[in-house]
Image (spheres, helix red, strand yellow):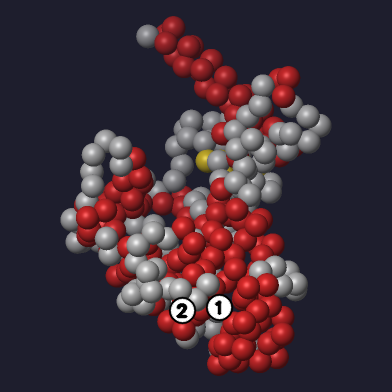
Amino acid sequence: MLRKSIRFCLFAACEGDCAHKSSYRSQNQDFAATIANPIETWQNRVWDPAVNDPSFEFYCGNITTDSILYPETKGLASMVGNLIQVGGYKKELKTLTTRMLNYIGYLNITTISGCVGSQDDCFSAYQPDVLRQDDISQTWRSWPYQVCTQWGYFQTGSGVPENQLPIVSRTLDLEYNSILCRLAFNITTPPNTDAINKYGGYRISYPRLAIIDGEQDPWRPATPHASPFVAGVNNRTSTTDKPFILIKGAVHHWDEYGLFANETTPELPPDPVADAQKQELRFVRAWMEEWNKEKELR
């Protein structure tokens, strides 16, 4: 099913002339990872229009509309319909056919049409020559290195319970997602997560350590604000000494964005963000006053 689907997507993108675009050798996992990429753009949503990335809204709009957005994909309707039925969704055939055709058109515009070279060149995770580049311009390496050495934040679909539909394909397993560790850093052992968790894990707490997250941050289940997604993790009372703030409606790091006084409007920043920032000012000032008093006593 996956291999056929990627051929359909490439067909739509290449308008029938795919010989120069693909060798059709890419693995199912590469396909699954490629079509999952738009989901990651949820994290890029920001309340400030000047820095907001509208990609997720574009993606969501494409796969939820019941109108054909890309007429050139209509010729694939029969093949897509067959796939949907094989997948067990015959009762939703009409709706899902339209939405999958739109997804193919969306992938064409955002991903496939920009491919220069073979399909493997563009979408394969196994690219040692690229991943081993480590000059100072390779700024992408810092976070993956932390993931590979300590954090272990590999986002797989393979571990999702069988009775639950995964957000990403179950073909995306630990072995596949750790290819980067092996090729980029020659790391072949599991991350030392104890180096992080020894500080308390979900229960990490320390004076003057502020824990601030967005209610809709995709990373929230991996933070002390994981309740109710993770059993045994409890909410806390926020104090000046140990702030614990969950910003309503916020995604990733929304409190880090700001406007000058002459740029604010009745809607911007959103009230929950503005309130969180006011709290941050208060507790940081209190910390500085405490530090100054301690300094005077030395």
Residue 96 spot, x, y in % from top left:
67, 80
| Lower sequence index among marks 2 and 1 | 2
Q: Determine whether 182 is above or below 84 in the image.
A: above
Using the rendered image of the protein, determine whether residue 117 is visible from the camera's viewpoint: yes
Question: In the drawing, what numbered circle is on residue 165?
Answer: 1
Give the spatial CA distance, label 2 vs label 1.
24 Å
Point 78% across, 36% down: residue: 267
> Between 74 and 187, which is closer to the camera in this rendering?
74
> Between 25 and 140, which is closer to the camera in this rendering?
25
Mark nearest the camera among 2 and 1 is 2
The amino acid at mark 1 is Leu
| Element type where label 2 sits in the image | helix
Residue 248 spot, x, y in % from top left:
69, 46
Residue neighbourhood size for the residue with mark 2, other residues' Cα within 10 Å, grouped as few (<14), some (14–19), many (≥20) = some
Point 55% across, 92% down: residue: 86
The amino acid at mark 2 is Arg
Point 51% across, 17% down: residue: 288
The number of discs equals 2
> Between 114 and 232, which is closer to the camera in this rendering?
114
Q: What residue is disc 2 on?
A: 7
Can you tell which quarter of the image residue 136 is in?
A: top left
